[in-house]
Amino acid sequence: MKICVLPGDGIGPEIMAEAVRVLQSLDLKFEMEEAHLGGCAVDATGEPYPEATQRLAQAADAVLLGAVGGPQWDTLPREQRPERGLLGIRKQLGLFANLRPAILYPELANASTLKPEVVAGLDILIVRELTGDIYFGQPRGIEMRDVDGQKQRYGFNTMHYTESEIRRILRVAFEAARKRNKKLCSVDKMNVLETTQLWRDVAIETAPEYPDVELSHMLVDNAAMQLVRNPKQFDVMVTGNMFGDILSDEASMLTGSIGMLPSASLDANNKGLYEPSHGSAPDIAGKGIANPLATILSAAMMLRYTFAQEEAAQRIERAVKKVLAQGYRTGDIFEAGTQKVGTKAMGDAVLAAL
Ligand code: NAD
């Protein structure tokens, strides 16, 4: 089990240290090697995704990433910015499936902007296609065109999917649903967009391979509405790149606690990049107060999806539930009556719970 560890920038090194301690405490043998990605890589080599990091990431079975970016690199040319490193590694590793769970632990129900009874116990997984759709469509651009005798600017992007691209992301989603409550909702806009009619057709054709999973379909506008009306009706949702971009952010915000949410991006062979959903939080970097739980839970996803160590993944998830039940809180999820702890003390609590 070879892991490429990329702490990154800002709070990245602080939260990664805790995730690595958790992994090392397990009864499993990992090979972990650390490298630079993002701003720290720019400082060290001039490149956000340097060659040494590329070699390690390609040779590893999984990549565990903290976060990248920060104001000190925002004035660099676009090609040298830390975020380019992130796009570069996703593209190079062919990570087409983005898995983002939105879980609201009952103890944190007050963190959500929605009523506690709507969100308490929420546990959904959004599966987003990551390398196709309108974001990667050709032709694209803005140009001058003659329209009704008038020259004006014309912007265009093209939505496109092949049936094999649709089928492979659906299979990831069906497999994920199989490991959960066996309900999959496929989200499209088939009443208007032919590309998503194809999406729905392929979903229906793929379903017989997974007779134990119940497949349903929903139009994306309704899905956006249902996510705030009654999010607990969902188990796994699967959708294209653009709809998934929007719905996964909406779903994560239902929980109100960005410091708690992990994510996974997988290739066709379950090699994956695992990272918290939040950024590098430069405002609190170096203070030892960042919440390490999203990174620790990303490590649990890595055990589940890349290494098929379901029991170890669940042990970590149970340990996180336990520390919340014990009342430990970092600043981002603190409320009266609980015990405020820093990054390392939260890691200690998870280790003790394990
Ligand atoms: P952010 O997620 O870093 O921070 C938003 C707010 O949430 C901040 O107030 C921050 O303090 C808080 N926060 C985030 N994670 C936290 C944690 N673990 N514990 C406690 N509080 C936490 O988003 P931003 O401020 O928009 O972006 C900051 C930098 O991060 C930018 O350079 C951006 O480009 C980068 N970024 C990177 C990624 C990534 O690496 N995948 C994702 C998003 C943003």
Image (spheres, rainbow, N blue to C red):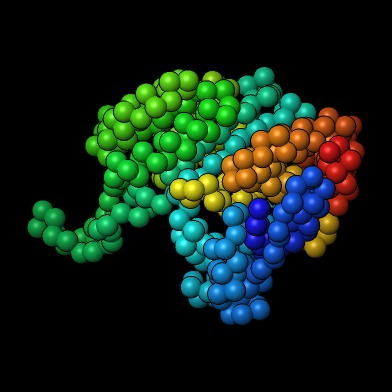
Image position of 267 with respect to 34: above or below: above
Which residue is found at the position 62% from the left and 45% from the top?
307
**Can you tell me which quadrant of the image ligand 1 is in?**
bottom right
Residue lying at the far bottom of the rendered structure? 45
The picture quadrant where one finds residue 331 is top right
Q: Nearer the viewer, residue 68 or 312?
A: 312
Horizontal relation, residue 96 to residue 117: left or right? left
Give the image location of residue 249, x and y in percent: 54, 42
Which residue is found at the position 42% from the left and 40% from the top?
169
Which residue is found at the position 63% from the left and 26% from the top?
122
Image quarter (top left, top right, bottom left or bottom right) of the C terminus: top right
Q: Is residue 57 visible?
A: yes
Give the image location of residue 28, x and y in percent: 75, 47
Horizontal relation, residue 313 to residue 168: left or right? right
Q: Nearer the viewer, residue 347 or 148?
A: 347
Give the image location of residue 34, x and y in percent: 69, 65
Give the image location of residue 321, x and y in percent: 78, 32
The picture quadrant where one finds residue 259 is top right
